[in-house]
Image (tube, coloured by chain):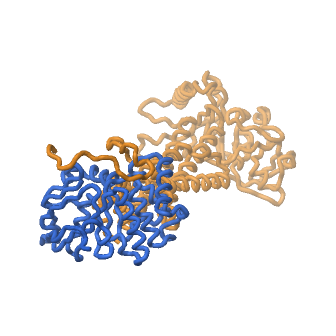
C-alpha cells in the first residue's frame, strides 16, 4: 500500500443531518449490541408462534419432567426420613435369627426365634448406654368386635414400648407392669383397628374385643402414626407380652418367653454405637457365641435404615431425572432442526443484512441468540409446568416436598447450554453464507 | 475515487470455468453519475457486486479511495459496505418483518450507533424521502415506489460516499420510476457519487456518463448522447 491513486477520503458532501461531523473511526465500530438482537429474536419467534411453541415443546416437557421428578423424589425422601424418625428416637433394633453373611444358606433374619424376654431384661439391667428396652412378639391374627372383624398385627410387649418407640396413647392408657406380670387380658388399639371395628377413639374404651377367640378389654387407643416403610403403625393391637405368649402364641422356649425382636433406645444419639456394642457383647455372652460361630441375632439402627432408604431414593431420583434429561436432549435436537429450517428460509434476509453491513459474527450472534431465546422460553414454560405438576402431586399424596430450587436453576443453565449447543451449528451455517449467494436466493 | 485495474471474474460451474469479466479497467471519480448498461449475461451485475465489495474479483486490483479492496479481510469489506457504500436493489430488499423505520435503522445498528441517534437520523432520512407518515408501516403495507424510497433512506443513513443502484426502477411503473430517478438525480446534485445498472435508456439518459458492457468487456464509455 505505498502508491495510492486517490487521496484520503474526505467527508461526505451530503447536506444531510450530521453530515458535517467527522466519520466514525473504524476502530470505533463495535458489534451490534446484543441487547438489540434479543427483541429481534423475540419478534421472529412471535411471527411464527405455532412453530415456536411446537419446537419448544420438547424442552418444555423435558424441563417439566426433570423438575417434577426431582421434586417428587426429594419429597419421597423427606417423607421416608420423617417416617423412620417416627419409629422412635435413638432406636436400635435387635432381630432374632442368624445374620446372612457367611452362611451358605441364609434363613433370613427373624426366621428362628433365638431371642427371649430374659435377653431384653438383661440388656435393660446391664447396658449403661441403653435407656429403655421393649421386647416384641408379633402375630397376625383375627380381631373381632360385635359383628365386625379384622385381621391385624397383634403386638405383645411391655410398657417400655411407649418410650422406646415414642408412640403414645391417644385415649385411655397403655397397659402397666402389673398387667404384664399377671398376664391381664387388656388391649390397646391402633387407629386403623379402631376404624375397622366400627369404633371411635373414645367409644372403644371399656369395650370387650375378641382376639383369636379370647376376650380382651380395651383400655386405650394409640395416637396416629401413619404408614412407615415397614408397616402401617396404626394397624396394630398392643397386649402384654405375657398374655401374648400364653394366650395367643403359646410357644415358649426353655429359656423363657421367646420374642421376635427387641427394640432398645440409646440414652443419647451419640451413645448409639456404645449401645450397639454393649448389646452385641451381652447377647454373645448370653447365647454362648464364640468365633467361628455366627451371631444368632442382628442389630440394626435407625441411621442404617435412613441411609439405606436414602440411597434407594437417591438412585430413584437419579434414574427419573436422567430419563427426563434425555427428553431434554431430544428437545434440543428439535431446536436445532427448526433453526436449520429458519436459516434456509431466511437466506435472503441474511444476504440483505450482510450487504448493508452485518459482519458474519453479527449473523452468528443473531441466530445463536434466537436459539437461546427459544430454549430459554421453553425452559421457563417447562419450569412453570414442573412446579404446577409437582405441587399438585404433592397435594394429592400429602408430601411436603418444596420446589427443588437447585433443579430449577440447573434446568435454566441446561437450557442455556442446549440453546448454545444446538444453535451453534445452524448459526455458523448462517454466518458462513456467501453474501451474494444469499442475496440472490428466493 | 474508485479504480478498477484489469478485473477478471471467472465462475467455476462444476468442471468448467465460465469467464464473466475479461479485464475491466474503470475509474469512477468523486461526484460521478454513471449508468452501466448491457444485455443480461454481459457481466454488469457481477461488476456491480465487485464494486459493492460483495464479491471478490478473480484477478486484478480494485482501489476504493486509497485502499486495495482485494487485500481486505471479510470484516473490513463488510465495514466498507456499512460505512461507505449504499445499496439499492431492483426488488428493494427490505426486511419484511421490520417496519420502515427499523429497516432504515438497520445499517446503523451494525455500525454501533446508540439508539437515540439511530432513531433521530432514521426519522430524518424517512422525512427527507417523503415518508414521514409511513415510518411504522411494514414493507408489505407500502407501494413499490414507497418501498424503494425506504431502501434509498436505508442506503443513505450511514452517509456513504458511493451509492450503488441495481436496476432501481426495474420493478416500478414508469411514473414512480421517474420519481425515484428524480430522487437519485437530486442526490447526485448534492454531490453523491452514484453508479447504477440499468437497461432502460430513459434512465441512463439522466446520468452523466454511460458505460456499456458486452461479454465482460467495456465497449463504450462516455456522456449520454444528446
- Chain B appears in which tint? blue
Q: Quadrant of residue A188?
A: top right
Number of marks in picture: 0
Q: Can you see residue B77?
A: yes
- Chain A appears in which tint? orange
Residue A442 in the image: x percent, y percent? Answer: 35, 72
Q: Quadrant of the N terminus of chain A?
A: top left
Residue at 44% in and 34% down: A293
Above/below status of A36 relative to B11: above
Residue A376 in the image: x percent, y percent? Answer: 49, 53
Left or right of B59 in this view: A285: right
Residue A265 in the image: x percent, y percent? Answer: 63, 30
Q: Can you see residue A360?
A: no
**Closer to the camera, A263 or B42?**
B42
Above/below status of A75 relative to B122: above
Residue A238 in the image: x percent, y percent? Answer: 73, 43
**Closer to the camera, A432 or B174?**
B174
**Closer to the camera, A271 or B154?**
B154
Residue at 36% in and 41% down: A28
Q: Quadrant of residue B104?
A: bottom left
Above/below status of A345 relative to A134: below
Q: Quadrant of residue B147?
A: bottom left
Amino acid at each position: 500500500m505505498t502508491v495510492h491513486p486517490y487521496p484520503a477520503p474526505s467527508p461526505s458532501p451530503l447536506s444531510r443531518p450530521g453530515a458535517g461531523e467527522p466519520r466514525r473511526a473504524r476502530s470505533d465500530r463495535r458489534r451490534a449490541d446484543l441487547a438489540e438482537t434479543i427483541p429481534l429474536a423475540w419478534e421472529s419467534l412471535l411471527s411464527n408462534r405455532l412453530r415456536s411453541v411446537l419446537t419448544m415443546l420438547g424442552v418444555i416437557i423435558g424441563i417439566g419432567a426433570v423438575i417434577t421428578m426431582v421434586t417428587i423424589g426429594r419429597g419421597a425422601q423427606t417423607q421416608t426420613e420423617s417416617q423412620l424418625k417416627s419409629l422412635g428416637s435413638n432406636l436400635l433394633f435387635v432381630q432374632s435369627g442368624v445374620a446372612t453373611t457367611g452362611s451358605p444358606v441364609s434363613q433370613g433374619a427373624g426366621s428362628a426365634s433365638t431371642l427371649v424376654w430374659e435377653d431384653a431384661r438383661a440388656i435393660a439391667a446391664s447396658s449403661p448406654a441403653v435407656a429403655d428396652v421393649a421386647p416384641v412378639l408379633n402375630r397376625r391374627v383375627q380381631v373381632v368386635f360385635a359383628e365386625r372383624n379384622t385381621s391385624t398385627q397383634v403386638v405383645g410387649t411391655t410398657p417400655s414400648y411407649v418410650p422406646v418407640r415414642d408412640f403414645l396413647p391417644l385415649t385411655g392408657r397403655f397397659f402397666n407392669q402389673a398387667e404384664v406380670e399377671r398376664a391381664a387380658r387388656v388391649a390397646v388399639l391402633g387407629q386403623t383397628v379402631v376404624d375397622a371395628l366400627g369404633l371411635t377413639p373414645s367409644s372403644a374404651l371399656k369395650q370387650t374385643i375378641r382376639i383369636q377367640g379370647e376376650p380382651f378389654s380395651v383400655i386405650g387407643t394409640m395416637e396416629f402414626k401413619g404408614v412407615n416403610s415397614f408397616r402401617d403403625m396404626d394397624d396394630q393391637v398392643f397386649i402384654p407380652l405375657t398374655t401374648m405368649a400364653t394366650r395367643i402364641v403359646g410357644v415358649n422356649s426353655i429359656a423363657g418367653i421367646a420374642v421376635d425382636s427387641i427394640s432398645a433406645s440409646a440414652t443419647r444419639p451419640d451413645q448409639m454405637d456404645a449401645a450397639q456394642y454393649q448389646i452385641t457383647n451381652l447377647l454373645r455372652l448370653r447365647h454362648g457365641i464364640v468365633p467361628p460361630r455366627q451371631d444368632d441375632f442382628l442389630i440394626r439402627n435407625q441411621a442404617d435404615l435412613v441411609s439405606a432408604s436414602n440411597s434407594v431414593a437417591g438412585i430413584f431420583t437419579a434414574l427419573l431425572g436422567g430419563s427426563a434429561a434425555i427428553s431434554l436432549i431430544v428437545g434440543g435436537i428439535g431446536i436445532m432442526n427448526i433453526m436449520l429450517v429458519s436459516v434456509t428460509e431466511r437466506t435472503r434476509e441474511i444476504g440483505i443484512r450482510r450487504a448493508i453491513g452485518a459482519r458474519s459474527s453479527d449473523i452468528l450472534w443473531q441466530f445463536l441468540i434466537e436459539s437461546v431465546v427459544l430454549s430459554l422460553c421453553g425452559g421457563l414454560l417447562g419450569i412453570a409446568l414442573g412446579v404446577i405438576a409437582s405441587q399438585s402431586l404433592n397435594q394429592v399424596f400429602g408430601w411436603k416436598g418444596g420446589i427443588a430450587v437447585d433443579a430449577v436453576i440447573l434446568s435454566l443453565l441446561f437450557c442455556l447450554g442446549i440453546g448454545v449447543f444446538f444453535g451453534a451449528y445452524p448459526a455458523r451455517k448462517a454466518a458462513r453464507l456467501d453474501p451474494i449467494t444469499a442475496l440472490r436466493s428466493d | 475515487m474508485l479504480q478498477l485495474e484489469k478485473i477478471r471474474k471467472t465462475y467455476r460451474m462444476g468442471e468448467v470455468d465460465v469467464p464473466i469479466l475479461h479485464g475491466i479497467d474503470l475509474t469512477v471519480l468523486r461526484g460521478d453519475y454513471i449508468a452501466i448498461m448491457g444485455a443480461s449475461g454481459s457481466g454488469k451485475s457481477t461488476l456491480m457486486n465487485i464494486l459493492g465489495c460483495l464479491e471478490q474479483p478473480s484477478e486484478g486490483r480494485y482501489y476504493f479511495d486509497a485502499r486495495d479492496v482485494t487485500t481486505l479481510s471479510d470484516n473490513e469489506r463488510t465495514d466498507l459496505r456499512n460505512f461507505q457504500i449504499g445499496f439499492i436493489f431492483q426488488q428493494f430488499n427490505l426486511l419484511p418483518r421490520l417496519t420502515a423505520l427499523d429497516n432504515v435503522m438497520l445499517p446503523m445498528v451494525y455500525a454501533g450507533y446508540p439508539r437515540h441517534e439511530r432513531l433521530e437520523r432514521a426519522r430524518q432520512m424517512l422525512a427527507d424521502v417523503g415518508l414521514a407518515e409511513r415510518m411504522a408501516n411494514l414493507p408489505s403495507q407500502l407501494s413499490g415506489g414507497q418501498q424503494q424510497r425506504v431502501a434509498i433512506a436505508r442506503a443513505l443513513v450511514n452517509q456513504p460516499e458511493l451509492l450503488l443502484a441495481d436496476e432501481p426502477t426495474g420493478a416500478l411503473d414508469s411514473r414512480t420510476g421517474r420519481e425515484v430517478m428524480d430522487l437519485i438525480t437530486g442526490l447526485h446534485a448534492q454531490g453523491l457519487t452514484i453508479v447504477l445498472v440499468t437497461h432502460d435508456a430513459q434512465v441512463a439518459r439522466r446520468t452523466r456518463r454511460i458505460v456499456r458492457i458486452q461479454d465482460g468487456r467495456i465497449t463504450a464509455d462516455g456522456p449520454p448522447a444528446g
